Structure formats: C-alpha cells, structure tokens
Amino acid sequence: MAEYKAFTQEWMDAWKEKITGSQEYKEIAKDWEGSVSITVNADPSKNVPETVYMFTDYWHGDVRDFVLCDAARAQTAKFVMSGDYARWKQVAKKELDATKALMQGKLKLKGDLTYVVRNIKTVNKVIDLLTEVNTIFPDEG
Amino acid sequence: MNGYTGKFLDIDLTQGSCKDFTLDAARLKKFIGGSSLAASLYLERYNLHADPLAPENPLMIINGPLVGSGFPGSSRFAVAAKSPQTGIWGEAACGGNFGPELKKAGFDGIIITGASSSPVVLSIINGEAKISSAENLWGRDIYDVTDVLKKEDKGWKVLAIGPAGENLVKYAAIANDKAHFIGRTGLGAVMGSKKLKAVIVRGNQSPGKADEQKYKEIFKAAVQEIKESAFAESLHLMGSDAAMDLGMMTGDVPVKNWTSGGDFELSSKLSGPTMRETYLTRAHACANCPVACKRVVAVKDGPCLTEEGPGPEYETCCTFGTLIMNYDLAAVIKANELCNRYGMDTISAGATIAMAMELYEKGIVNRQKTDNLELTWGNMDAVFALLKKIAYREGWGDMLAEGSAAAARKLGGSAIDSAVHVKGLELPMHDPRGFHGMGLAYMMSNRGACHLQHAAMGMEQGMVSWPQLFAMKEDYDGKTSEGKALLVFNAENYGILGNSLSICHYLMYCLKPETVRDAFNAVTGFNFEFQDFLLCGARDWTLKRGINNLLGVSVKDDVLPKKILTPLTDGAASGSVPDMELLRNEYYAIRGLTAEGIPKEEKLRELGLEELRRKLYENK
C-alpha cells in the first residue's frame, strides 16, 4: 500500500481520494457547504521547519479544492483550524479525537461552532478518512 | 475570616426561632463549604434516622468560599438533606444569584429544621432573619410566587417551591428566581414538609479576600482562559444542549427509555443548534459568569405556546425528547415550563414518564390504570396532563409522584425492569453503555445516579485533560471498563469540589486547575496545593458514603439497573455493556472500602473522619 509524506500535495490528494471514494461520506456530508483550512504550526525539532497551510473545500458531499496554500488563503476559509504539529499527528494517527482536542484547547477553531456541531458527523468522517491514509510523518520518515 | 462571613443561621420553624452560629476555621479548612460542610454538620448534629419529611430532617443551604468573590462560575450554592426520594444523603447544587446574595446578607449558610403549622416565608435582609406568613402564596406556581414576591422588591433573590413541593412529590425541586433549579433528590418536598414556601435574601455586605491584588490577576487570567475555551464558546452558543448531536454520535444519548441508541433524526430536531435557530430569544447568565449557557426561549405559535422564559437543558431535551420519542422541541419546551412552574426535577419527571410509557406499551398498565391517558410514545398531550396529575398527586399521578423505582416496586412483577435508577434516583441522560466510567460513577455517587458529583463525564468524554492533577489519558475509549475505576476515583476527588468551593462544573471544565486553586487561595488565604484539594474531595466522598452506610447502603446497592446491563442493538454503543464487577472491585480497592462497601477504619483515620469511624465501627 502506498505511503505518503505528510503535508505534501500527494498526501492531500490521497486524503481527497479517500473522501471522494466514500459513499458514506457523500451521504453524511450532503448538507455541508464550505471550506476548512488547516494550519500546522512549525516545529523544527520535529522536522516541520515552517508552518504548513492547507485549504480544503466541501460542497454537498463533493470535494472541491484540496491544496496546500499560503497563510493569506488559509485565513479566507469558512473554518480555520490550527494547532501544533504534535497534536495534528495525534489526530492523524487516531490517538486523539479531533473534537476532544478542540475542547481541550489543543486545536483551535475559528468559524461558526454551531455549524460544526450541527454537522459533527461530517467533520468526524473527514478525519476518520484521514486516519486511513498511510502517512509518513516528518519526525518518523 | 476571608472568603467566609463566619456566620450561619439556625432556623427552627416549629419554634419560629432564628439564631446565628459560627464554625471554627479548622472545620472550614477541612470541609471547605457547600454540600461537604453540610454533610459534616448533618453527621454530628442531626438524627440520621428521622423520616426525610419529618420536622427533624434539616434542610441545609450552604455557600462555598468563592461565592460572592465575583470569580467566574462562583454563583453556586448547595442544598442538602436526607432525600425523600431515595432515603439516603440528598444534595443538589444550583447557580443563579441566591448564593452570592446570601453572602451579601451576611451568612455562609442556613440550616432549617422543624415545621411550621401554616405556610411561611423566610426573609434574610442584611443580617436580619424573619419568618412571616405565606398563606397568600401557598398554592401558587413557581413563576407566579416569584413574581409576587419580587413585586415587593425586585432586588430580592428568591428560592421557592411550587405545587409539587407543597404536595410532597418525591422529586420536587426548589427554584431560584424561576430559572435555576435545585432539582435532584426531592429537596423541594423537604421544604414543602416544613411549610416553607420561599426564602428571600438581600444584602449589601462584601466578604473580604486574603490577597486582593493576587485575586485580581487570577481573575483576569480566568476570563482570558474562558475567552479561549471552545467548550465555553459552545455553551454560550448552544447551551448544555450542544451535547446532543455529538452525544448521539458517541453513544451517550438514551433513546426510548434506554432501549435504543441511534436516532439522528431525534437528535437533530432536539439539538442545541436547532434550539438556537428556532426558539432561543437570548442567552442568560448566572451571577459572575461570562459564559451565559442558560437558554431563554419562547414558543410563539402552534399548540405548545409558552411565554418567554427559562429553556430546557440537555438533560430535559432527552427526558422529554429522546427518552419518550418526542421529536417536537416546542413540546419539550412546554414540558420544561410545566415542570418549572410545578417545581419538579425534569430528569426524574421525564424518566418516570418514560418508564410509564414503556409499561403501557408492554401492557403492564392500561388506560384504566392511567386515568384514561393514552401513554403511547411521544404523546405529549398525555405527558402534559400527567405532569399536572403528578404535581397535584391526582389519580395515577399519586403513584408516579413517588419516582420511578418506588412506583415500579408498587406495581410489582416485571415493572421494576423498566425503572432505570441507582439507589432510587433516575439516571441522568448519559448512557453508561457508551461510557463505562459513567456507569461506575452512577453506581458510586452518594446521592444515587448522578453526573454532577464528579468530573467523570468531562474526563472520559475528553472535554478536559488535567495531567497536572493526576495521571490520566487525553483520549479514553468510552466502551471499555479497564482503567475506569481510577478515572472515576480521581474524577470524584476533584469534581466534587465544584459543590464545596462552590463553582460551576462547566467553568471547572473551562479553567485550568491551577487557576481554580489560585483563586481559592487568594480568596481564603489557605494556601492549598492540588493534593490538599484532592484530599478534601476524598474526605467529602467518604463522609457522604459513611452517612449512607449508616442509613443502610452497602455493596448490594452499588449496582447498575438491568437496562444498562443489556446491550443495545443500534447506535454507537451497540453491543457494549459496562463490566460492573470489574469496575466495582477495582474501585473498592482504590477507594479503601471493605467488601461490604464500607470505608475501612484506617481510611477514615487517614481522612480525619474520626466521628464517622466511631459511628460505623463502635456504635454497631
């Protein structure tokens, strides 16, 4: 099974493929509208020399943009999620639930929390599909 | 003494007397305040074997040291008595504004014994207590009586009971200014048994702080922590009902009297976001709270019209929603308003009606028994009618006014299998099949099944992570019993402080433990470390357990109901049940209990509970 270096476009493409290939996602996400950016804070000690920005966009069960981006574009997303590399790694490895990380203040969310709660199944499904991607992490590869 | 007024009121309603008394600093340091201090007084001064509705049973209303300081979440106060619903230790904590005002009026607490021969109101205005007639108030519902009293002085903070308390409904509640409820364990019936319709407080005193400058710095840090907390934001936006959508996904939400676990249409129609989009008119805050999680709602059209008023919490959206298969949020709001006006705990009332609906479906009761009410799932007209019958003890309502466990026992046969309770108190709306630690917390909670005598929910569901307090994971698997005994032990020792300090559990989830500790120290000058807090928490739990042991509680009572030991076939908790034996055995070992469920002598000595030790071991 192919492996992908985390936070590369190839890795994002593999994640997007998981999402678009999921019939369950299509059903769950039929009401979701809008983009989510992900900010992974730099951590040179873990081989993440610069902050990584990703822009992902979802529309009624389809996936639109799914790309690396710059800080300015990340800020334009409907929802901006940010956190330290170590936390995102825990989430991607299914060691820490993203909702719990948010409540514990280990990840931050900017955007309409009500919308996220209303669509929590969609959010969790997207994260679940991320954990299915064979990922090589910067401090492990 | 900083943080305390140093004065308590001793009210004897039989004699019509009001006296002050004081407590020494050593006792306050040992038990802090709230329900913990109440338990220490109860053990030492009162007849534990008095009937809960007898004049000798004291009704204790006690503040904690943070109350009146202005610290976020410090509006809470505890009310305690032997419970008429369970026959064991009863307590409930409440937010609102009564606690801070009682301190301004000059008192840390009120202990009420005796019973008046006719209805009375107790007023405490700037250090002066007075008992006066309430003949004109008896029979009025809670909203009405509060309005009448506040017409005299809108600055009065009011505690009142409604018809349910007057009629000694075993799960009658006490309300603070209509919106904040001492709901659980039937303390409204204790107040009703004393013919005490209301307590009014008003004052302008200001309790001192040990280190005012330090307190200001901590206060600022606390406000910042709350601003940055996603948990606080979700509470502000959606109230406690923010938990509904996520809860259905994780297996927390009970459906159809605990027989189902996966109905996303139900959760979607009854959730916090839905309430916000439909019936919410504004958010409301307890005194000194920047979060404002309370809902104010109005149903302006349709068959369930309500005036603008206090909205339902998550628990109520379950008991009058998911638990009885009602998909209509407006009807939940109406049921909530009726319970508020009658003065009944919405958890016990809704859960008792859910049991009744199941019994109706099974044919154990029929229309002859139910006074011709068709108790089919989701029939809210029948629910509204039944709530009134319960509050006034009319017809079948008289039996249901005893609570689900007592009513089921009276019906006999297999009816008891439909009653979902621990020690006579109905389970709150968090399914232990999705979170096994919660099952243990229900089993071991000293007031019967409870989600607020500990922080198990926050810890097990991942709302908080406090590695600075004790070893714990950031992310627990809810559907496993391994390791949960230690989680619950720690969750009790820290979480119960909410009811003694007294501070809102939600705010404890938003604030760092360091901030809570430092605020406590700045106010009291006690210089507690975390270990001191945890020791006080362990002492609190053990003291209340010992009181319950003296009232007959033992290992036989530390059990989960049959429903919870039956796996679900749908939803996120499908196939999962708590391992009750494992949980209990591990917990007993950690807590220092004998096989019979009694605190060991050495544990009582270690915790400084000498009088309890004597009563348990020398007075047999």
Image (spheres, coloured by chain):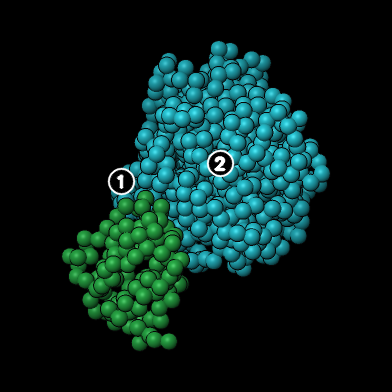
Chain colours: A green, B cyan
When the figure is inspected, residue B311 is found, relative to residue A106, above or below; the finding is above
Q: Position of residue B505 (x, y in %)?
A: 48, 48
Amino acid type assigned to the residue bearing label 1 in the image: Lys
Please report contact status of discs 1 and 2: CB closer than 8 Å, yes or no.
Answer: no
- How many numbered dots are placed on residues in this image? 2
Mark 1 or mark 2: name the one nearer the start of the chain: 1
Horizontal side of A97 relative to B543 (left or right) equals left
Residue B54 visible in rendering: no
Q: Position of residue B139 (x, y in %)?
A: 59, 18
Residue at the farthest left position: A72
Amino acid type assigned to the residue bearing label 2 in the image: Asn
Disc 1: which chain? Answer: B
Q: Residue at x 48, y 66 (%)?
A: B475
Residue occupied by mark 2: B326
Horizontal side of B74 relative to B403 (left or right) equals left
Q: Disc 2 on helix, strand or loop?
A: loop
When the figure is inspected, residue A122 is found, relative to residue B193, above or below; the finding is below
Q: Mark 1 or 2, which is nearer the eye?
A: 2
Tag of residue B216: 1
- Name the quadrant of the N terminus of chain B: top left
Q: Residue at x 79, y 37 (%)?
A: B410
Q: Residue at x 62, y 47 (%)?
A: B256
The quadrant holding residue B276 is top left
Label 1 and label 2: CA atoms lie apart by 47 Å
